[in-house]
Amino acid sequence: MVAPAWRQGQPEPLGLYISVPFCRAKCSFCNFASGVYPRSAMPGYVAGLLRQLRAARAWAEARGLVLPDRVDTVYLGGGTPSLLPPGLLRTLLLAIRGEFTLDSDAEITLEAAPLQLEPATLEAALQAGVNRISFGVQSFVEAEARATARTHSGAEALAEIERVRAAGVAHVSADLIAGLPGQTGASWAASFARLAEAPLDHASIYMFELDDDSRLGAEALRGGARFGAQLLPHDDAVADWYEQACAALGAAGLGQYEISNFARSGGRSRHNERYWLRAPYLGLGVDAHSMLRSVEGRCARFAVGDALGAFLEGASWEEPHRLTAAEELEEAWFLGLRRNAGVSLAALCEEFGPPAIAAYASALEELTGSGLLHSKEPGTVALTARGRLLSNDVFAALLLAPAPPGRPSQFAGSDRGPIVDNGIDGHSY
Ligand code: SF4
């Protein structure tokens, strides 16, 4: 791994994440800040995004943060940004070009739900430079999709992928969720087989996670039968299904490059890679997360609140949380290890100093002995296949690694703040 551009004194390009929180229906498994809001709110919402675009440079400079002018990835997520009317989509992408210098080969992704991308919106997206569409399919089995508030059949989802390919979209991705209510080994196998055969160059597999932020998750934790929590498959089965899907996608040429992500050659999500590599990105809109570096090169994270009403009334980024060296190192581990390529120990030593990395030696040894980590290439550490399944355990063990001798003041006792949210926005639920 080469040292990041900012350490070599080179300007680093920026990624833009744009949250569009409008959805046609609220999916039962969804824990994002999205909702079924009136279309009449869309113009005001896009006006709020333009306001942030124009204010970003002065806002960052006033806080000693570097906002690169050059942009090489743009990601419209949410929410369902494919629901935006063509005129608003055009306005938004034009405004980005007005405020930043967009690379001629920039990756520009639009998230879409099957059957929720009008032909006129697709045409406007292509004209405005969108070259990647990410479909939140979740299941190619109609009954499973419907149980979560999706309305597509497997054939319809496949037809949507073929339609955007035929229209000239260079890169197409689709997501599936393992562990939906009523899912069985056979239905999951049918879903991932369709994913593997579809004309895609990228795929994501997520395992449904129980938390209070989705209605299905809350029901599973607290009881009830409205969203099918009683039909959730067992965790062990879901873990097996994840492994089966990894193998099937790999055999179909979609190689795994991150815990949840798979791509053909040239199909990796450049935008999502910047999260794992700690490259800068600016998030605009409701609940969007950002990471910029200070003029001294340290990471600062900040976000926009998740209330649509407040955003429409002018709310913007909250004050940044400036990471300590210890927090940055923790992030370097748990974000870097998500990638199959793992992390380079030499690069970590260069960035944080050998004593800071030496403090992890016994934890790394123990995790390697347990079969959760391995050294794929000399001088690197990566998760094994089992480690990817138990990644939270690996990250927890690394967070507990002792402070390095002789460096207690820098690497101990920090006020952690909300850094554990890694800002991974590249989902298309
Ligand atoms: S999963 Fe996607 S489409 Fe469904 S409610 Fe959440 S953001 Fe909207």
Image (cartoon, rainbow, N blue to C red):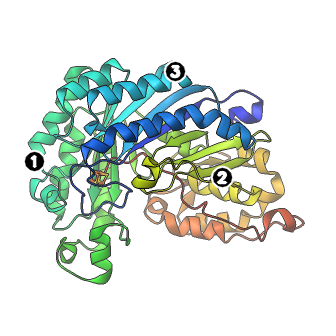
Q: Report the amino acid beneath label 3.
A: Gly
User: Residue 185 at what x, y percent from top left?
Assistant: 18, 63
Q: Which residue is mark 1?
A: 153
Q: Report the amino acid beneath label 1.
A: Ser
Q: Look at the picture and state if 223 lies above or below 109.
A: below
Give the mark nearest the N terminus, 3 or 1.
3
Give the mark nearest the N terminus, 2 or 3.
3
Q: Nearer the viewer, residue 8 or 47?
A: 47
Q: Which residue is mark 3?
A: 98
Could one spot residue 357 in this view of the protein? Answer: no
Q: Report the amino acid beneath label 2.
A: Pro
* Cβ–Cβ under 8 Å for marks 1 and 2: no
Give the mark nearest the N terminus, 1 or 2.
1
**Residue ID at (64%, 66%):** 398
45 left or right, relative to 28: right
The yes-or-no answer for disc 1 within 8 Å of ligand 1 is: no
